[in-house]
Amino acid sequence: MNKHATTTESEHLVEDARALLAATAHVAEEKVVEARRRLTAAIDKGRETWNTVQEKAVASAKATDQAIRDHPYHAIGVALGVGALIGFLLSRRN
């Protein structure tokens, strides 16, 4: 699943949850009020987690990019070694 699909699905989920919150806004039963409070908290927590994951992914990509720029021949060697290992393992599997 790519980033765009994941983002779109999570946006739809949040929209659906907000629609549910709006649809139950007039209900004052204790169980519904508690469920609405938990859903709102879950949406906020999900948004915080999503932002944290995005920040970490960007930081990791920048660090990887810098490491490759600092040591291009080492990066090529590692990529070649990993590729050879994967090729070897796949050839033994068949």
Image (cartoon, helix red, strand yellow):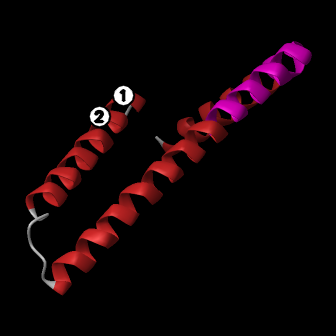
Residue 83 magenta-highlighted: no
Residue at 60% x, 41% y is 89
Circle on res. 8? 2
Residue at 54% x, 43% y is 51
Q: Which one is nearer the viewer's eye here, 36 or 89?
A: 36
Q: Which one is nearer the viewer's eye here, 3 or 45?
A: 45
Q: Which one is nearer the viewer's eye here, 49 or 63?
A: 49
Where 33 sits versus 85, above or below?
below
Quarter where residue 66 is shown: top right
- The reply, left or right, for residue 64 in relation to residue 73 is left
Q: Is residue 37 visible?
A: yes
Span highlighted in magenta in the image: 57-76
- Where residue 25 sits: x, y (%)? 14, 63
Q: Is residue 92 visible?
A: no
- Where residue 55 sits: x, y (%)? 63, 38
Where 51 sits versus 61, above or below?
below
Q: Main secondary structure of the magenta part?
A: helix
Where 76 sits versus 39, above or below?
above
* Amino acid, disc 2: Thr
* Amino acid, disc 1: His
Contact flag, marks 2 and 1 (Cβ < 8 Å): yes
- Where residue 93 sits: x, y (%)? 51, 44
Residue neighbourhood size for the residue with mark 1, other residues' Cα within 10 Å, grouped as few (<14), some (14–19), many (≥20): few
Outermost residue to the bottom: 30
Quarter where residue 1 is shown: top left
Circle on res. 4? 1
- Where residue 78 sits: x, y (%)? 80, 27
Q: Which one is nearer the viewer's eye here, 80 or 47?
A: 47
Residue at 31% x, 71% y is 37
Residue at 52% x, 51% y is 48
